[in-house]
Amino acid sequence: MLGIRDISSPKALGLILIIGLIILFIITKNSQAVMRAMVGQEISWRTASFNTVESEYFIIKYSDEDIQYIDEIAAAADRSYLEVTRIFAYSPDKKTTIVVYPDTESLAQSFGWDKNEQAMGVYWAGSIRILSPGAWLTYKLEDEFYREGPMVHEFAHLLIDDLTKGNYNRWWTEGVAQYVEKRVTSFQFDNPFVKGNPLTIMR
């Protein structure tokens, strides 16, 4: 067909190399889409037994023990969507999946982290995973979950990932997400230097 009879000939090896480079180029050019598709399939498989509810902008998956928090999660998520998309002047083209985990151990396990790792929320490859408000809120209050919860921060990560097609440094996306979170909810982490703790440079 191509005039190649011997696969070890220079012509055959050159053709294999060219095909390999084309495949590599296609994969790297679409690596964000490939990763999102793989993570999306993993989430679908791991959360097949979870309940699902859709808000205006999100698909929320949760276990039975978190049913009492779903309305406040959906309200905070949709409110976050409106605020954060206004700042970025950009909206995703489809609904984002949010997976609610009842405790820090199950959230950590969903990433293969050590069970002692603690986070209130994590954005990863097109989906948001959050810790149930029941694990950290002492009372059910929608505004409290919105202001102190992870939705604004994690959704900002998603928009950064969308807009840059995954081409960013981790420190940069974290800084932008914290800036957006402070602007929208006024939440910010404590300044470690407020109490007179000077910044020291070790040599």
Image (spheres, rainbow, N blue to C red):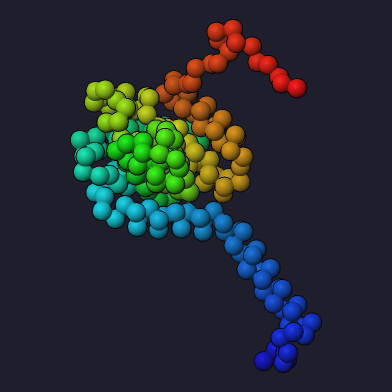
Please give left or right for residue 149 compared with residue 161 in the image: left
Question: Which quadrant of the structure image shows residue 200?
Answer: top right
Please give left or right for residue 181 compared with residue 46 in the image: right
User: Observer-nearest residue: 85 or 36?
Assistant: 36
**Residue 36 in view in this figure:** yes
Which residue is at a point 30% across and 46% down the rendered structure image? 61
Quarter the C terminus occupies: top right
Please give left or right for residue 17 compared with residue 59 in the image: right
As drawn, 52 above or below 71? below
Please give left or right for residue 110 compared with residue 159 in the image: left
Q: Position of residue 170 (x, y in %)?
A: 58, 38
Which residue is at a point 30% across and 31% down the rendered structure image? 135
**Residue 71 in view in this figure:** no
Quarter the N terminus occupies: bottom right
Q: Position of residue 162 (x, y in %)?
A: 52, 46
Which residue is at a point 24% across and 49% down the rendered structure image? 51
Q: Position of residue 168 (x, y in %)?
A: 61, 42
As drawn, 2 above or below 85? below
As drawn, 110 above or below 76? below
Question: Which quadrant of the structure image shows residue 25?
Answer: bottom right
Tally the marks: 0
Question: Which quadrant of the structure image shows residue 201?
Answer: top right
Which residue is at a point 44% across and 46% down the rendered structure image? 111
Taking the view exactly as shown, the residue that stands out farthest to the top is 196
User: Observer-nearest residue: 9 or 2?
Assistant: 9
